[in-house]
Image: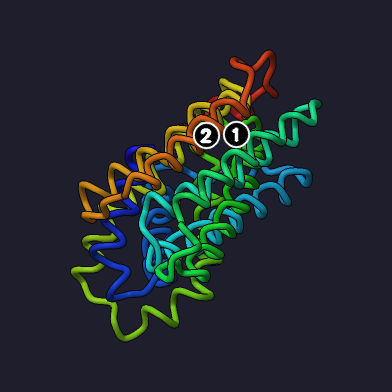
Amino acid sequence: MLMIQLGSALSAGLLIPELGAGGTAWLRLTLGAIILVAIVRPPLRDIRRSDVLPLLGLGVATGLMTVFFLAALARIPLGVAVAIEFLGPLTVAALRRPSARALAWPALALVGVVLMTEPWRDTVDPLGVLFAALAGAGWGIYILLTQKVGDRFTGIRALSITIPIAALTAAIIGVPQAVGALRWEHVAIGVGLALLVPVVPFALEMVALRRMTTTAFGTLMAVEPAIGLVIGLVILSQTPDALQLVGITLVVVAGAGAQRGGRRNTASPPAAPHQVT
């Protein structure tokens, strides 16, 4: 979570102003794909017909989530964007529980988001809020598919397939934005950012989701909006007011309250364990 939010803040300060949100997403994902393919052999021979849609879905969801989130960062503060984005996986977790009372947690988080965005002020950016909400929908899908794909492939081998798909998805928007503006210094910065996001944290998430339930994972992820708020303050000098601090607290509490569970009881046997991870 720390690496993802640090990568997002640095992207907002170093690349988005020059390459645009789409161009930055495409560059990060493309360089991440190159790094992954260079160090991990894509498990193409191990792909079954039933794996195709989850792999494609995870790749497309990752690409769209990245593009929409960076587009939100271009318009609204990092902490606010993360809090709105968090509504996606939080709602998914609540809907997967049998009790209707679980829906109270997303409602509490929504109150927190309202306090953070302060829509009664003229400073709110509706398009930025929409982009963050779309990123949240992508995040919810990403968590579900990451666990499904992670159960089939050991280590980070699946990422050597899904991240290239994500890069191709982002290229539709990103290449037109980046053409004419991309320079070698952007590529150098992009390599470092690609390690921060997506290479290392996505690999850690896939390993984590092989060991725990999505609800337990979501409980830990509940602190990510607070991390985003702190990183935004330190890196981007985005200072929240008192009402926004109350709002972020509600989002974190709602995220933790919506999730119950822990270690997964079973997991599908991993495919081809002899492969290099």
Q: Position of residue 144 (x, y in %)?
A: 66, 39
* Quarter of the image that includes the N terminus: top left
Residue bearing the label numbered 2? 206
Cα separation between marks 2 and 1? 6 Å
Q: Residue at left 65%, top 47%?
A: 141
Residue 84 is marked as none
Question: Crowding near pointer 2: few (<14 within 10 Å), some, many (20+)?
Answer: many
Residue bearing the label numbered 1? 150
Q: Residue at left 57%, top 48%?
A: 139
Q: In which quarter of the view is residue 111 placed?
A: top right
Q: Nearer the viewer, residue 248 or 143?
A: 248
Amino acid type, residue under disc 2 in the picture: Met
Question: Could you tell me which secondary element the residue under label 2 belongs to?
Answer: helix
Q: Position of residue 37 (x, y in %)?
A: 43, 50
The correct choice, above or below, for 46 with respect to 239 in the image is above
Question: Crowding near pointer 1: few (<14 within 10 Å), some, many (20+)?
Answer: many
The correct choice, above or below, for 209 with respect to 109 in the image is above
**Whether residue 4 is visible:** no
Q: Residue at left 21%, top 71%?
A: 184
Q: Residue at left 30%, top 62%?
A: 12
Q: Nearer the viewer, residue 141 or 180?
A: 141
Q: Is residue 4 left or right of residue 213?
A: left
Q: Which residue extends farthest front?
A: 120
The correct choice, above or below, for 65 with respect to 126 in the image is above
Q: Is residue 151 left or right of residue 28?
A: right
The correct choice, above or below, for 164 with respect to 103 in the image is below
Q: Nearer the viewer, residue 159 or 178?
A: 178
Amino acid type, residue under disc 1 in the picture: Gly
> Is the C-beta separation of discs 2 and 1 under 8 Å?
yes
